[in-house]
Image (tube, helix red, strand yellow):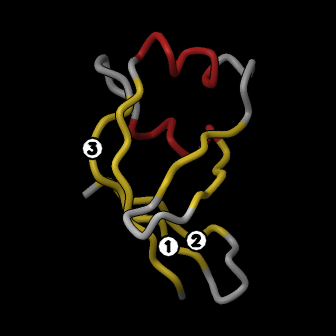
């Protein structure tokens, strides 16, 4: 298993285009400088009136397949 940590700050209005399907992925940069492209749908459970804000931990399996996304 691999774990990646990153911060994200996307306003509700900006995330709406992801939510509506106009954009399919979100690009994040981990604390180690690695760029990851994630499906926008993975962030929907973390959407609030402020948007998507906070620290996150992405867990993948040994083949880098998505396992879990946690807000810290």
What kind of element bears circle 1? strand
Q: Residues within 10 Å of mark 1 (few under 14, many from 20)?
A: some
Measured from the top left, where is residue 68 in percent x and y?
A: 51, 66
Looking at the image, is mark 1 or mark 2 earlier in the sequence?
Answer: 1
In the rendered image, the vertical position of residue 47 relative to residue 32, given as above or below: above
The residue drawn where x is 41% and y is 27% is 10
In the rendered image, the vertical position of residue 30 relative to residue 9, given as above or below: below
Quadrant location of residue 40? top right
Residue tagged by mark 2?
A: 67
Q: Residues within 10 Å of mark 2 (few under 14, many from 20)?
A: few
What kind of element bears circle 2? strand
The residues bearing labels 3 and 2 have C-alpha atoms spaced at a distance of 19 Å
Measured from the top left, where is residue 31 in percent x and y?
A: 37, 64
The residue drawn where x is 45% and y is 40% is 45
Contact flag, marks 1 and 2 (Cβ < 8 Å): yes
Residue tagged by mark 1?
A: 59
Residue tagged by mark 3?
A: 54
């Amino acid at each position: 298993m691999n774990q990646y940590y990153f911060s994200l700050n996307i306003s509700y209005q900006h995330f709406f285009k992801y939510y509506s399907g106009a954009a399919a992925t979100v690009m994040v940069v981990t604390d180690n400088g690695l760029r990851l492209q994630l499906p926008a749908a993975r962030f929907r459970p973390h959407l609030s009136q402020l948007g998507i804000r906070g620290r996150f931990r992405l867990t993948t399996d040994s083949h880098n397949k998505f396992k879990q996304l946690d807000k810290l």
